[in-house]
Image (cartoon, rainbow, N blue to C red):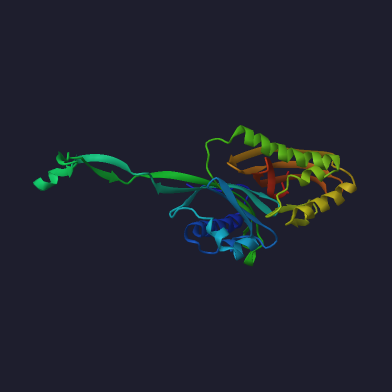
């Protein structure tokens, strides 16, 4: 059963269902092309692969076939649940994708292999005949198991005819529980954002921003859209804003952190008050990857929460 998203209009839900349906088709049948589902303003895609990950922006997905080919799920994959919410111009949240895949074959002894012709019962070895003993005949039974993935997303209505497209999409295998040490590392990266705007210095923050791909997107209280596709664009803007005064308040709360190997996603809230930008209570989603022993931000998508 697919649970309805909350805080969305029927029209929102219909448009998002179209995007999600296209996403499943792309992941299982490679149609439509993956890059076409992402915003031209800035966007990132990440999928957990083997022991690592594959990450790309819209342009790379379009020009590099090998990158798009990594974003594949088994045939028959379906959306089994949604937990989405509207935050200003964005929709953020998580979707669960599930497929039945064939399990490793299990052998079942169903009889004894006959010896056949009498001459087949003996074989010559080291100058004498040896007796070939009958062996078991094995019949295999195909079995299926259920496998699930989590897609954490941020989307905006900027496609043709106001269709929804991704600002961020991160796909990871579902896990029973995230590694505590990894969760701690992710939260520490987020605390760096808190400290940077409170102290008015983004030099520390720069060390925790992934170089390529990268996208930070937000809507401020005045309705202005900000899309940053390079880390230095973001830090330059923040430096200018903080030069007018550092944040009076900065706190990330209600953080739902999920980790899978070197990939992590976060859905939560950031309460921040920067004089130049105003007081903001933002719902946000983030995607991070671990490199050089630290968790680095690949994408952030945030918009205003209603009071």
Q: Residue furthest bottom?
A: 160
Q: Is residue 271 left or right of residue 180?
A: right
Residue 114 in view, yes or no: no
- Residue 39 x, y percent position in the rendering: 65, 60
Front in this rendered view, residue 247 or 112: 112
The answer to whether residue 39 is left or right of residue 220 is left
Residue at coordinates 70% horizontally, 41% vertically from top-left? 269
Residue 41 in the image, given as x and y percentages of width and height: 70, 61
In the visual, does 60 lie left or right of 81? right
In this view, the residue farthest toward the front is 127
Q: Residue at x 58, y 41 (%)?
A: 261
Classify residue 117 as left or right of residue 199.
left
| 64, 23: nearer the viewer | 64
In terms of depth relative to the viewer, which is nearer, 254 or 162?
A: 254
Identify the image quadrant of the C terminus.
top right
Residue ID at (58%, 54%): 13
x and y percent of residue 131 in the render? 15, 39
């Amino acid at each position: 059963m697919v649970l309805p998203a909350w805080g969305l209009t029927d029209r929102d839900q219909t448009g998002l269902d179209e995007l999600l349906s296209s996403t499943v088709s792309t992941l299982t049948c490679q149609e439509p092309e993956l890059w076409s589902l992402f915003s031209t303003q800035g966007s990132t895609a990440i999928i957990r692969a083997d022991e690592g990950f594959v990450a790309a922006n819209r342009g790379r997905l379009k020009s590099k076939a090998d990158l798009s080919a990594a974003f594949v799920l088994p045939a028959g994959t379906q959306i089994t649940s949604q937990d989405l919410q509207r935050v200003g111009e964005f929709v953020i949240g998580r979707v669960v994708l599930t497929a039945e895949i064939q399990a490793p074959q299990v052998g079942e002894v169903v009889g004894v292999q006959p010896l056949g012709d009498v001459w087949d019962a003996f074989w010559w070895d080291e100058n004498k005949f040896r007796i070939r003993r009958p062996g078991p005949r094995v019949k295999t039974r195909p079995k299926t198991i259920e496998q699930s993935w989590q897609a954490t997303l941020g989307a905006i209505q900027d496609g043709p005819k106001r269709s929804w497209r991704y600002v961020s999409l991160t796909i990871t295998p579902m896990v029973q529980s995230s590694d505590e040490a990894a969760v701690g590392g992710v939260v520490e990266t987020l605390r760096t954002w808190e400290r940077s705007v409170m102290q008015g210095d983004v030099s520390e923050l720069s060390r925790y921003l992934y170089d390529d791909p990268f996208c930070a997107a937000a809507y401020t209280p005045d309705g202005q859209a900000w899309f940053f596709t390079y880390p230095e664009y973001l830090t330059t803007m923040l430096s200018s804003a903080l030069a007018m005064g550092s944040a009076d308040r900065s706190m990330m709360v209600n953080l739902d952190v999920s980790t899978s190997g070197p990939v992590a996603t976060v859905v939560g809230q950031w309460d921040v008050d920067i004089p130049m930008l105003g007081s903001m209570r933002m719902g946000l989603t983030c995607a991070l990857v671990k490199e050089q022993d630290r968790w680095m931000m690949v994408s952030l998508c945030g918009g205003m929460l209603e009071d």
